[in-house]
Amino acid sequence: MGLQDGVQGRVELRGLVKRYGPLYAVDHVSLEVSSGEFLALLGPSGSGKTTILMSIAGFEYPDEGQVLIGGEDVTWSPPNKRNLGMVFQKYTLFPHMSVLENIAFPLKMRGVGRAEREERARAALHTVRLGQMGERRPAQLSGGQQQRVAIARAIVYQPRVLLMDEPLSALDKNLREEMQIEIKHLQREIGITVIFVTHDQTEALTMADRVAVLDQGRLQQLGAPRALYEAPETGFVAGFIGETNFCEGTLHAAAMPGEAVSVALDGGGRMQAVAAQALPAGGRIRVALRPERLRVGPVGAEGMAARVSEAIYAGNATTLLLEGEGGQSLRARIPAGAGLHEPREGEPVRLSWQPADARAFVAAS
């Protein structure tokens, strides 16, 4: 299974729109995927991620916009003319065929001779590390092995791009986590472009080079996992990626992205943060702060006064549920083994943070 060149696996969406009546399933989405890149389409149900994938595959046609693959406009091309591989949530392996016959089936449909298709099927089987299982039936394999067979079948004819629609959702938690790493290693090994649909943000952050976060058909943010987690550009991304504390208040003076701000919190107190977007003077502001970035100190230290409502031990960390001086509900996370003081339930504390770790957004109306 050879690497692609720098063009064939490139995917570009230009102003993609898909409507169902008055509803925008996809609302003017534009993005580029480099050849050999792993992109995750992430969002809640109804965000448009599967509609985008089906538009790339050719099973949906957009109302506006273009789909380009390898520089070629394939917007109106049928699926069988796009040379794409697909892996779905249900693997749809043929139970009466051997594993090797399942993998070779797409080649048979393309008129490839018996000897060549068996050779290429065996090569694909070795790529997914199931070289000794070619004569077994799908029912004799575990869920993870069946999933690898489905991937081998999708890559055996050397497609330009591999599309994956929530392929891990049927697996149990441990196997799912194992397969996330397996698929990422496989993608790097064969150098294929992968576009992967998921609603699981941990899965997206673990597997993808970049993540496109979608909500209500609109692209909210496109970037590397670390950038999405540490520098979300919208309140939606801040809340959807990882766990976040949100506090609301008002801002006295307008601010531009990247500027330090001081937000007057509802109920009292102030919160130092950095503007993640343009903020209006006197507007309603929402500040996002990750639990692990909130430092918990003793009474007398600098910071916001708070009281511990509950301490939840979870092995690798203790989560503190806190009530701020203005009635704000907050969470802080203290990692195990760090030698930090873990306050008890009812204990008064002071909360502090780096202003750069708190992101200020316009509050949704």
Image (cartoon, rainbow, N blue to C red):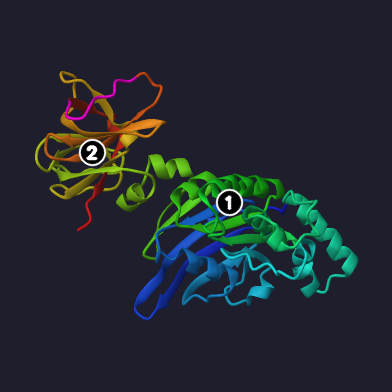
Q: Position of residue 342 (x, y in %)?
A: 28, 24
The one nearer the camera, 202 or 9, is 202
Q: Quadrant of the C terminus?
A: bottom left
Which residue is located at x 12 percent, y 34 percent? Answer: 325
| Secondary structure at numbered mark 1 | strand
Verify CB contact (< 8 Å) between mark 1 and mark 2: no
Q: Amino acid at mark 2?
A: Leu
- Nearer to us of marks 1 and 2 is 2
Q: Position of residue 112 (x, y in %)?
A: 84, 70
Q: Which image quadrant for residue 106?
A: bottom right
Which residue is located at x 63 percent, y 64 percent? Answer: 91
Per the picture, the main secondary structure of the magenta-coloured stretch is loop
In the shown orientation, is residue 241 left or right of residue 87?
A: left
The one nearer the camera, 121 or 3, is 121
Which residue is located at x 28 percent, y 27 percent? Answer: 295
The one nearer the camera, 143 or 66, is 143
Extreme-left residue of the structure: 267
- Mark 1 lies on residue: 38
Q: Position of residue 349 (x, y in %)?
A: 19, 25
Rendered image: mark on residue 330: 2
Q: Position of residue 35 (x, y in %)?
A: 64, 54
In the shown orientation, is residue 105 left or right of residue 142?
A: right
Q: Which residues are magenta?
A: 340-347
In the shown orientation, is residue 14 left or right of residue 158?
A: left
For marks 1 and 2, give the CA distance. 35 Å
